[in-house]
Amino acid sequence: MPAVPAPGPPHSPLPLAGAGGAGPLIAGRYAIDPARPLPEAGGGLAAFAVIDHAGGEAALMAVQVPERAAARPLVLAGLPDAEGILRPLAHGPGDAGKWFVICPAPPGRPLWPVARPWTEAEIFALLLRPVAAALEVLGGRGVTHRAIRPDNLFRAAAAAAPVVLGCAWAAPPAMHQPAAFEAPGVAMCLAAGRGEGSAADDVYALGVTALALALGRMPWAGLADDELIRRKLEHGSFAALAGEARLPPGLAELLRAMLAEDPAQRPSVALLLDPDQARGRRAAVRPVRKAQRALLIGALQIWDIRSLAYALARDRAALRLLQDGRADHWLRRALDDGVLASRLEELARRRLADHASDDAAADALLLLRAIAVLDPLAPLCWQGVAVWPDGIGAALAVHGEANERLAALVVAEAPVAFAAMRGEAEPNPAARAAARAQRALLQRRGWSGGAARLCYALNPLLPCRSALVGGVPVARLADVLPALDMLAAGQPRGVTLDGELVAFIAARQEHGMDGVLSEPASPLAALRILAGLQTALRAGRLPALAAALAAAVEPAVPPWHSRARQAAKQRAAAEASATGDLAALLAVLDDAAARRDDTAGLRQAAAAASRIDAALAALDQGAPARSAAARALGQEIAGALALAALAASGVAALLQ
Amino acid sequence: MSAPSAAAPRRGPGLWLFGLGCGALVTLATPVAVLAALLLAPCGVALVLDTAPGRPTARPVLLAGLAGGLHPLLTLWGGGDGIAGSLAAADLPTIAIAWAAQGAAWLAAELAPFAVTLAQFARSRIEAARLRAERAALEQEWGLPPPPG
């Protein structure tokens, strides 16, 4: 494999690609060329050629992250540069808000379709060993591939790695895996809710791939997923997939082991590196225990325990089998499994004793426990949806139609009950704390809670899906303000926040803004949030956003009583808007001390006006009295003058 | 001149004492009384016409008449020339001075209340204008409603 550039920063919205590419550069160097799609390279996702502006010579591709989904954070955190892996180099936004993962382009064509069945030697030399080597590298970093299938494995010229694992980093784990390539307990899950899984899941998918290549065909092609899962449960995966096909005995035994229902029974990746050891592997697979008579659920005939669990998971109406005792009766009589029957009886009794609980949640918990008892390999099943607990986040993001049930699952802390039923450490403080934290996020009131907040919290790389920033890539907290400022420049009176954007901010922020984010929705609350964000992130000037927020907030803020203060505040708001300082704008529009002064001033002005009115009334009403007093005063003055004249005359007479 | 009060003025003992004094003056000092009558004749008219309580117009006229006639009366009182002396003292300049003084006092008694009322009215107008301006400023600044009416 040619050398590839070292991983760069996650992404940089600027500068633009320029000639040869369109849209922004990813990680400052990778330009996507939308005119050069790579149809088979993306492992089921759209892929395009990439131009490396740093001058790298390796052929690169950009794999588009599916809409509503997020790329895999564990993988993108960094994988070693190893043979057989299309190591992710960077990720970031391309055109129109689409997200891409940059990685080397596959060196050759996919393995599928094949011209002829592969021989056992080819299977070992060209598939199992090189893929196992790549999986061991991934395992060393604690990650899985989860997209192993013939059309996502690519031929390579290198002798050490004749096969390369395709890109599996741009979508939730196993999201695009057909049901045939996943064990029944995974295949029945929501596509995005299959979780990270383990190396054993990759071994299973590799086993199915090897089977397809060895046969030169896929005997299960054309079967519906549901039918395929039922067959796997009834007959075991190998039998369901291989059917009557004949394989070399050594390969058949290995594939039977790789397709064991129990992940613990599958061979390790290390074992697959050694063809001799792998050939000698004998499967310790127990045949599926069949009942003497079928349990009928409608037209469906159930012959084994795992199929019963699957029926319960698929059909919520099957709950009545537990409630009326038919399931445990069937287990006791037709399968002679008194222990399992007793455990089901006990669960049903607990549900009856728990009659005060919310019916739907309690019924769902009963089903969850019953399915876990019947099939320890089954995923978490809740009201007709199935997920692995670590896939709840991705399922929330992708499967909007199941959000209500997924939310109910989180509210009921079903993952804790699921872990307990699977015999995991009980109580598991970390799992319980995580479940409670998720529930708290979901039930938090205000903008910053609800399913959207939980979704962003569980999907660290999920870009913001707010319609407000539609078309503008916002994946990091730091992207929010520039994106809003850019939008505000186009619609100066239309920018505020919505629940989706606030949930995104709340999930991504680490700056103690929970108090502000919990406020009821209002334009002023939006300003508080964005001002807090600008301060916390030390973001630059945002004049367009400030002006748009001022325009949105000012009508919602009560007017000042004092006209002079109103004018002064308007001037100050205009100045703050012009400087793009949201904190200053907030200080102007949300000035509690000035608001108190204004109210007190109004009271004082009203009192002064009353005093003036009283004084004017007194002036009007006292006119006659004042006139009389003035007349009397005038007469007194005349009298005084006359008296003074008399006194002067007397003095003059005395002096003569 | 002051308008007579609506109710009939009460004639108190002062009037009788005033009459007794005048009678005693006429009897005991007839020349002085004659001269005084000549000099204070306008005052008598004023006393008759001014029926307001306290005689606010007649009082300054009386005082001014006394001021104008004080010198000839004292001269007559000291000379003792009888009725002839009294008539001699009542020459035209003396009477003119006394009467002019009384006229001036009457004029002052009539004009002073008017002037004071005028000044008072002007002061009220100025005060009201100041208050209205102050209120208008408050209305303008705080958006207060105008006064009722």
Image (cartoon, coloured by chain):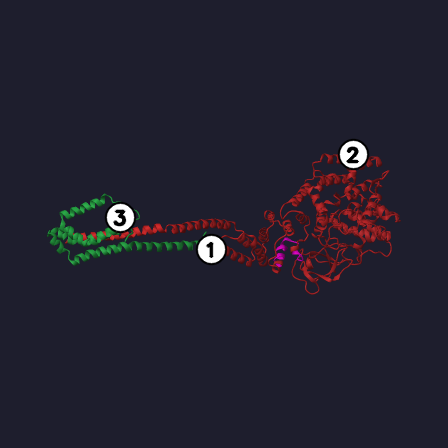
Q: Is residue B123 visible?
A: yes
Residue found 74% across the figure and 43% down from its top: A383
| Residue holding disc 1 | B140
Q: Position of residue A216 (x, y in %)?
A: 86, 53
Q: Is residue A381 above or below residue B82?
A: above
Which secondary structure lies at badge 2? helix
Which residue is label 2 attached to? A342
Q: Residues within 10 Å of mark 3 (few under 14, many from 20)?
A: few
Which quarter of the image is occupied by the N terminus of chain A?
bottom right
Depth check, front residue: A531 or B9: B9
Asked if residue A478 is among those painted magenta in the image, a careful observer would answer yes
Q: Earlier in the sequence, mark 1 or mark 3?
A: 3
Q: Position of residue B68 (x, y in %)?
A: 19, 54
Q: Secondary structure at mark 3?
A: loop
- Quarter of the rendering occupied by the C terminus of chain A: bottom left
Judging by colour alone, the chain drawn in green in this rendered image is: B
Of the chain colours in the picture, the one used for chain A is red
Name the dominant secondary structure of the magenta segment: helix
Q: Chain of mark 1?
A: B
Q: Which residue is mark 3?
A: B54
Residues in magenta? A469-486
- Which residue is at the front of the view, A576 or A567? A567
A469 is higher (above) or lower (below) than A381: below
- What's under tag 1, amino acid-wise? Gln
Q: Nearer the viewer, mark 3 or mark 2?
A: 3
The residues tagged by marks 3 and 2 sit, at their Cα atoms, a distance apart of 124 Å
